[in-house]
Image: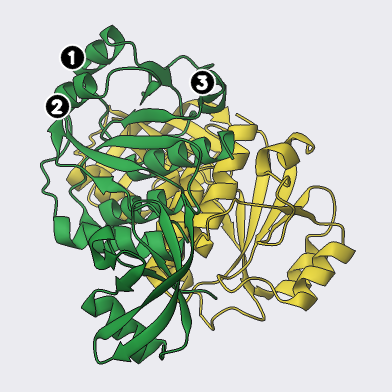
Chain colours: A yellow, B green
Amino acid sequence: MVTYFYASPSAFRGAYVTLPPDEAAHARKVLRTRAGDTIAVVDGQGGWYQVAVDVAAQDHLAGQVVASEQAHGEPPYQLTLAVGLLKQRNRWETLLEKCTELGVHAILPLTTDHGEKATLRRARCERVLVAAMKQSKRSWLPALHDPLPALEALQQQAGASGLIATMDAPADAHPLAVLQGCSAGPLTAFIGPEAGFSTDERAEAQALGYTPVSLGRRRLRAETAAMTITAACALAFP
Amino acid sequence: MVTYFYASPSAFRGAYVTLPPDEAAHARKVLRTRAGDTIAVVDGQGGWYQVAVDVAAQDHLAGQVVASEQAHGEPPYQLTLAVGLLKQRNRWETLLEKCTELGVHAILPLTTDHGEKATLRRARCERVLVAAMKQSKRSWLPALHDPLPALEALQQQAGASGLIATMDAPADAHPLAVLQGCSAGPLTAFIGPEAGFSTDERAEAQALGYTPVSLGRRRLRAETAAMTITAACALAFP
């Protein structure tokens, strides 16, 4: 099983890369990487690199890029998930992990009229995103935006291919049918809190031309709705 | 927001139902249900009942069925998920919860050649399943079978509409394309452990006529693969 390491673009000097200390320590101590080995490194911006290790000392591991590929493991569309921030940290982290595995491009946490008050623990969230990116063999680290009120986010993301999951969507507003009408490219999907979007938020989405989608007759938790729309995109645009 | 209560068929005497003590206590203490109120009760076997409460005492709540519906909130197919039992309890419980929300009919935990040793904590798992059934407004409580070795499970479940998710499935073995060839009815999907099914297990699946499906180019954790195939069925047969 191939292990991917993460080094942001700033860790590259031309075709030479130095792993950050925590990745270097993991490579050395857990995976026993030595000089002469070849490892796979992703830069979180779509770059995948095969690296021939030439230095593997305590917390320091570096080497020469011998092969590379752009958009490695990435889908042909860019899905931004605009989703009500959850109070329960384990549910929020499950959302981040699963949606990363399923190909999300960016996550925009929302504060909503009916949502619970919650705070974003950025450092923890980033660790979850990095681990899921590496585990799922992606090369893009999903961007985690600062939380925005839903009304503001709806305006910011307005444009082509905006979807909104609501319980009152027409029954025929099936995600796959709706996605067939979209081209693979930038997509934004709004997912409300469990109590749903407010009348104001839904009116704004309608005024701005967002397409309602129905995620079926069962009541899904917010993180399950987020995973389902992310999986639907992956299934619709393989 | 409607709260569903759970009472197994044995709690019904004709059209009169008595909630189990924990459900009764929850109804009384948390939701302040009183005699004269109407509540929604599901029996875990597809039955949904509107119940007029006539007794609401300490830990004892009972009433008369005034309306009922069969297969309430249930999909038109019955998906059995045969999936490698996970060692990490929180990941296993996430799988149970999410797949219940997404419409799974039964879960058959597998012991596999490449899987980790793990035990099933049945009482905890049942609580997760019941909570997810009620939360998602389903009426069917997914059956949780006893763990079986994968080879035995493959034989037991052999028949029409058996799928197996493998990393070496042909790229065109897309779940939606495969599911279009199935009729809505009994379906079984085998999901391997993260290290994949062994050569023996894959050979047995092939010999028994299971259809390989590919869940895409990204490496999914076992529980994410389980959710994805469950979501794919929900999307394919709305």
Residue occupied by mark 3: B178
Query: Which numbered mark, 2 or 3, is in the foreground of this view?
Result: 3
**Mark 3 residue element:** helix
Disc 2 to disc 1: CB gap under 8 Å: yes
- Whether pointer 2 and pointer 3 mark residues with C-beta atoms closer than 8 Å, the reply is no
Q: Which mark is residue B113?
A: 2
Using the image, determine if residue B72 lies above or below residue B59. Answer: above
Residue B200 disc label = 1
- Residue A47, quarter of picture: top right
| Distance (Cα) linking label 3 and label 1 | 23 Å
* Foreground disc of the pair 3, 1: 3
**Which chain is mark 2 on?**
B
How far across and down, in percent of the image, does residue A8 sit?
51, 50
Residue B214, position in %: x, y?
45, 24
Q: Earlier in the sequence, mark 2 or mark 1?
A: 2
| Circle 1 Cα neighbour tier, 10 Å, few/some/many (<14 / 14–19 / ≥20) | few
The N terminus of chain B: image quadrant: bottom right
